[in-house]
Amino acid sequence: IKKDWSDHALWWEQKQQWLLKPSWTLDKCGIHADARLCLTPQHKPLRLLLPSGITLRMRVCFSSPVFRTVVGICKLL
């Protein structure tokens, strides 16, 4: 069974940031041996509760800036 890794990226837990530049070395990013990195999908499900009481489930990009993600959600609504 083949797994598609194209949506995955490295998440740096201590700094709370995505490592999205694949051409950079870990040293250039400032990552040392004690860093905890997680290989996780960038797009994840989100449950959004509207004022009307309706709950929407959608997939959003957690690696993009918050404002851009909110704009994308508003366009869907």
Image (cartoon, rainbow, N blue to C red):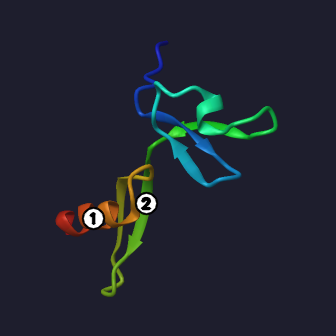
In three-dimensional space, the C-alpha distance between marks 2 and 1, rounded to whole angstroms, equals 10 Å
Residue at the image point whose x is 45% and y is 33% from the top: 21
Task: Please provide percent x and percent y for residue 33.
Answer: 79, 32
Question: Residue at the location (40% across, 27% down)?
Answer: 6
Coordinates of residue 16 in the picture (x, y in percent): 61, 55
Q: What residue appears at the point 34 percent right and 80 percent down from the top-left corner?
A: 50
In the picture, measured across the screen, residue 76 lies left or right of residue 38, that is left
Depth check, front residue: 70 or 31? 31
Residue 60 lies, with reference to residue 22, above or below; the image says below
Mark whose residue sits in front, 2 or 1: 1
Image location of residue 76, percent across then percent down = 20, 63
Residue 43: x and y in percent read: 41, 46
Q: Check the image and report above or below for 56 versus 34.
A: below
| Residue at image mark 1 | 73
Q: Which residue is mark 2?
A: 46
> Label 2 is placed on what type of residue?
Leu
Report crowding for label 2: few under 14, some 14 to 19, many 20 or more residues within 10 A (C-alpha): some
Give the position of the C terminus as an image quadrant.
bottom left
- In this rendering, the answer to whether 45 lies above or below 42 is below
The tally of labels here is 2
Q: Amino acid at mark 1?
A: Ile
